[in-house]
Amino acid sequence: MSTFAVGDEDFLLDGRPVRLLSGALHYFRVHEGQWEHRLGMLRAMGLNCVETYVPWNLYAPEPGRYGDVEALGRFLDAVARAGMLAIVRPGPYICAEWENGGLPHWLTGPLGRRVRTLDAEFLAPVEAWFRRLLPQVVERQIDRGGPVVLVQVENEYGSYGSDRDYLEWLKELLRGCGVSVPLFTSDGPEDHMLTGGSVPGVLATANFGSGAREGFATLRRHQPSGPLMCMEFWCGWFDHWGTEHAVRDAADAAEALREVLECGASVNVYMAHGGTNFGGWAGANRTGGLHDGELRPTVTSYDYDAPVDEAGRPTEKYRRFREVLAEYAEGPLPEVPGPPARLAAPVRGGLGEWAPLGEVLEALGDEESRAPMPPTFEELGVDRGLVRYRVAVPGPRQPYPLGVTGLRDRAVVYVDGVLAGVLDTADGEDVTLAGPVAGPAVVDLWVESLGRVNYGPRLAEPKGITGGVRHERQYLHGFRARGLRLDAFEAAAVDKVRFESVADRSGPGLHRGTVEVTGAGDAVLRLPGATRGFVWVNGFCLGRYWAAGPQDALFVPGPVLREGTNEVWVLEVEGDGVPGVELGVL
């Protein structure tokens, strides 16, 4: 058994000073079959520690119902086998460019801005979640023979709020659940963030991508003693749909890393390996300095321009970081692991079957809800997916503008079954169809959440039609709403859908087909002719695709593919064409 403590100037491992050279790797963004390879890549880069968040909403689709929470324990066991230490950041809020910052939709829906405060209706489910999650962390602490040396209290709270009593409550909850290793907080190196996010008696760390000396000087004004650590050294950045791909120069990032280490500090490279937002779990941000402007949804790839890329390959940044970190290593670094198996040759497949979106909804959708005004996604229990809102325009009446107030985030609109246009929050949350609508008519609005906000003051905002639908100035009433959740697309469930040949007709709906693979391994998937939607391979949801770019291909982990026939489903929600399927070689 070992001990780990916070000293006056250093971290202490069994009483001896130690520097944490850590890298962020979110186990839930990496296929479990590839954890050990990715950890080996980090170890060979010169890291002795790995950090991960834990997304509450991934494991709690409903209150009191939990999924594979034990995945965290399996990952920490893999960390131990790799000979590394571990930092765990359990939230309850994690940001991480993850849907809703990791908070469950069923909690933020009714509570709104009451989350992340000392509100009893928020604290009760947090405590229930931590008591379900934390035993596997406690069992794997370093003083019990495991790899865990640090656990975080909340996450960048100073960027959001100032409820010190809430942070104190969380600290006591962690201790009450058996967490005995040192606790820490992490915030930007600004006075108001450190003031709002720090907890007396808990180590404060700072997050930045450059300017280490200035950042640590600010931290020292708030914390005169204790080890310095950059808990998030931002070596790259993430992408949003419809924007340019983010890249950071490798030499610049390596020099910034060197500056952190020259300050005598510990570091956590964010991200060392980003991975993928499988399953449509990507979050979203708001533009502007106050993060209160236009919605910017995050792409499926979480490559982050990290030193280990999305497919697990070393980059120029990896080589540069390895050179810097080797100077601080105790002995020679391990050899860089070879790449995982890759697809032997590119292949193409066909999507010969198709079912219109309405029939997919009939087969896989939730029960229909009726209400005078449109219910939100949260009120319908929909986290990721679509909601079809149906409302009648009375008549007879002359053509008037049809508008939506409080749209979040994108709606494909049909009038009497005919496509009438696409409305998007890029044009604002109060939007109007290009052409007028006469009555009587039946209007269908297929609304998709492009990702819940994961950072800033707009956290916990609802999705769907959050205001109403107007014909001229008059609100329309009498809505029928029905959700189509991504979780409904399971192998057995999809068999309920009545498919027909795409030779007959096509459009938005569920396409199904196969690709034949010889030499299975990591690959990329492209869907030429597709517009926007989601794709599954052998029942595994790769995530969202969108012709808006900058991402034009989805990463397919080798363990998802199999030799021979592989089934592909494509849920196209906007385009009229028949997508092609291409598996490419990395």
Image (cartoon, rainbow, N blue to C red):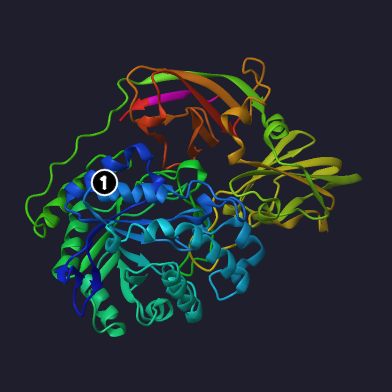
Instruction: Kindly indicate the quadrant of the structure image that contains residue 340.
Output: top left
Dot 1: what SS?
A: helix
Asked if one can make out residue 397 in the rendered structure from this viewpoint, the answer is no
Residue 224 screen position, x and y as percent: 25, 84
Asked if one can make out residue 149 in the rendered structure from this viewpoint, the answer is yes
Query: Residue sitting at 39 percent across and 79 percent down?
Result: 199
* Residue ID for mark 1: 39
Residue 65 screen position, x and y as percent: 59, 51
Lateral position of residue 519 relative to residue 97, left or right: left
**Magenta-tinted stretch:** 579-583
SS majority, magenta: strand
Instruction: Kindly indicate the quadrant of the structure image that contains residue 473.
Output: bottom right
Residue 63 screen position, x and y as percent: 62, 56
Lateral position of residue 288 relative to residue 394, left or right: left
Location of residue 79 with respect to 338 vertically, above or below = below
Residue 1 screen position, x and y as percent: 23, 61
Location of residue 192 with respect to 326 vertically, above or below = below
Instruction: Kindly indicate the quadrant of the structure image that contains residue 445.
Output: top right
Query: Residue sitting at 11 percent across and 52 percent down?
Result: 323
Q: Nearer the viewer, residue 20 or 72?
A: 72
Lateral position of residue 418 relative to residue 409, left or right: right
